[in-house]
Amino acid sequence: MGLESVELQVAIPRTVDAGKMQAEQQERAAAMQNLVAYQAEKQEEINRSKVLQQEQSAAVKNERNPGRGRDGRPFQKEEGKRKKTKGGQVAHPYKGKFIDISG
């Protein structure tokens, strides 16, 4: 099943066209990848500027109300929150007191 001269006259121009189409698709894919990278970089820059603005506003709020948290209430010491048990030990915040051995 070889190609005859008439078939070659049709096949050769089509291979050139196919090569051009493939090159265009590769260029399009590279352009899309560059666009996505550019958009991600811009979004990252926007997020960075938002974080800086939030940090600056938090610093200003802390200067206005020293010794107070974000909600305006004064800080509480961790030691004062926990209660001591009879033995003088501090109660653990989430561990239980009893062991269930009934199985």
Image: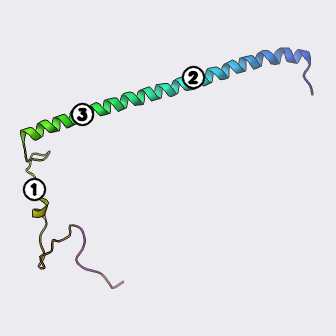
Q: Which residue has dot 3 on it?
A: 52
Q: Is residue 63 above or below residue 80?
A: above
Dot 2 or dot 1: first in sequence order is 2
| Type of amino acid under label 2 | Arg
SS for callout 3? helix
- Mark 1 crowd level (few <14, some 14–19, many ≥20, 10 Å Cα): few
Q: Is residue 67 left or right of residue 24?
A: left
| Residue at the (49%, 25%) spot, across then down | 34
Q: Is residue 21 above or below residue 58?
A: above
Specify whether residue 1 is painted magenta. no
Specify whether residue 95 is painted magenta. yes
Figure quadrant of residue 15: top right
SS for callout 2? helix
- Residue range in magenta is 94-99
| Type of amino acid under label 3 | Leu
The image quadrant where one finds the C terminus is: bottom left
The image quadrant where one finds the N terminus is: top right
Prevalent SS, magenta region: loop
Q: Is residue 92 above or below residue 11?
A: below
Q: Which residue has dot 2 on it?
A: 28
Q: Which residue has dot 1 on it?
A: 76
Q: Is residue 89 left or right of residue 8?
A: left
Dot 1 or dot 3: first in sequence order is 3
> x%, y% of residue 8?
86, 17
Mark pair 1, 3: CA separation: 27 Å
- Mark 2 crowd level (few <14, some 14–19, many ≥20, 10 Å Cα): few
Q: Nearer the viewer, residue 81 or 7?
A: 81
